[in-house]
Amino acid sequence: MAISSTERGSWNSKLGFILAAAGSAVGLGNIWGFPTKVATEGGAAYLVIYLLCTFLIGFPVMVAELSIGRKSGKNPVGAFKALSSNKFFPLVGLWGVICGVMILSFYTVIAGWAFGFAFEEIFYYLGWNAAADLLTDTGNGWKNAIIASVFMLGTIKIITGGVSDGIEKATKMMMPLLIGIIVIMIGYVLTQDGAMDGVREYLLPDFSKINARLIFSAMGQAFFSLSLGMGALITYGSYLSKKENIPQAAAFVTLADVGIAFLAGLLIIPAMYVAQAAGIDIFVGDQLASSTNLVFQILPALFHTIGGAVGLILGVVFFLLLSIAALTSTISLLEVPVAFVIDEYEVPRKKAAWGVGLGILVVSIIVAFNTSLIGTFDNIFNNFGLPLGGLLMCIFVGYVWKTDSALSEMELGFAGVKQGLFAKIWPIFIKFICPLVIAYNVYQGILGML
Ligand code: TRP
């Protein structure tokens, strides 16, 4: 029995696809991870390397993933099976599904922190200090587990709605809201004392800070932020109509992702210096405060210093923004294993979404009680797993399926692509430049884990 197309689903419109894929891309990685890494890894120098990784390596890989997905019309495992008889590559798809599952398991916990902080701001304003303190305690297992569960149930609910009625509708509403909120907050922060010090740190590069570690970190960040390397875009590409122009859609998604990361940096780096001007300690030794501290301690401290209704509104809005961005990403992380179960085991969507979602929730709850697992999972499945997946996908498209077959798939929605400049440059990136650069990073990742 073949899966009916209504069971698989498809995007209603091009804009819907772009917003969903951009929603997948824009998440904690952009608003939490990126500014943090800019702050700790060399300011504007990091920004420059990140942009190079995104456009020179990420974008070509995204085009490859979308082409695999649309040609095969399948989940990552099914896609590799459909496009070649090689027995190894479906395992690459399976590795992608596993990375997605594991990333989702800790992603919901961090998303839960963000969601909890939106309420913390309200409780703080009301003077309910015990409740507010509970929500700021990122190590509280029960609290983490409960909020992560709420987040996961929301994600499952949207996925059961299917591709166009669930994912597409939800992201179409959330993405414009998100951009609006960021822009308004930037407007506020940049007019505050100290903001310009942050803008300088963010935009004036000191190239002496570039080293192998910075490049490794920027590459991992680019893959994670663009949602590359685990077949999320194979899956989203499988719902894409043959009329659409793949390189153009990929360009929109890449620009949206970079644009929002850039804006988030422009919000958060200056906000740190505003916090400093307000008397909050933002340095740990001579390093800027990093990761969890930055977004989950310094920003709330800033909102509290601002105080009153303005502090409350900024705080609530910021953490809701972070939650919305996270939700459009958890949707894509869950959709991959769900599509895998729907396609390969012919399970109806609702059953697949609940079964897979609740299974991942069990892992999430374990992470909720043992938050030190986050760093470990992040290293294995994100920093190492995604570039590895991306590398193998380049090898697949470059040498097994062949870039020419991918270009033929692109041609359906992009007449004349084979005669243009794109067809001359993109294959060189997929066959040589991307695999070499990514392989170097995978190697660094292995060294880092030893
Ligand atoms: N890109 C998202 C972020 O920046 C995270 C994410 C969603 C992701 N789906 C993915 C990462 C698929 C890798 C693969 O937060």
Image (cartoon, rainbow, N blue to C red):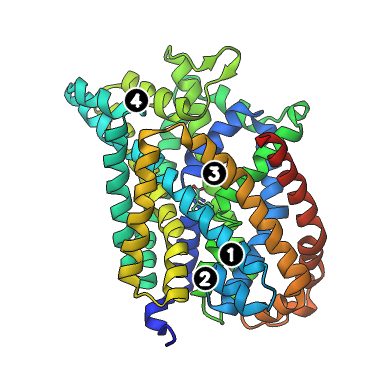
Q: Residue at x 66, y 57 (%)?
A: 390
Q: Nearer the viewer, mark 3 or mark 2?
A: 2
Q: CA distance from mark 2 to mark 1?
A: 8 Å
Q: Is residue 414 visible?
A: no
Q: CA distance from mark 3 to mark 1?
A: 28 Å
Q: Position of residue 384 (x, y in %)?
A: 63, 45
Q: Say which residue label 1 marks.
A: 93
Q: Which mark is residue 75?
A: 2
**Horizontal side of residue 332 vs 145, given as left or right:** right
Please report contact status of discs 2 and 1: CB closer than 8 Å, yes or no.
yes
Q: What type is the residue that disc 4 sits on?
A: Phe
| Up-down relation of residue 307 to residue 105 (above or below) | above
Dot 1 surroundings within 10 Å: few (below 14), some, or many (20 or more)? many
Dividing the image into 4 quarters, which one contains the N terminus?
bottom left
Please report contact status of discs 3 and 4: CB closer than 8 Å, yes or no.
no
Q: Position of residue 201 (x, y in %)?
A: 62, 26
Q: CA distance from mark 3 to mark 4?
A: 21 Å
Does label 1 point to a residue whose CB lies under 8 Å from ligand 1?
no
Which badge, 3 or 1, is on the more N-terminal residue?
1
Q: Quadrant of residue 4?
A: bottom left
Q: Say which residue label 3 marks.
A: 261
* Element under disc 4: helix
Q: What type is the residue that disc 2 sits on?
A: Asn
Please report contact status of discs 4 and 2: CB closer than 8 Å, yes or no.
no
Q: CA distance from mark 4 to mark 1?
A: 44 Å
Dot 3 surroundings within 10 Å: few (below 14), some, or many (20 or more)? many
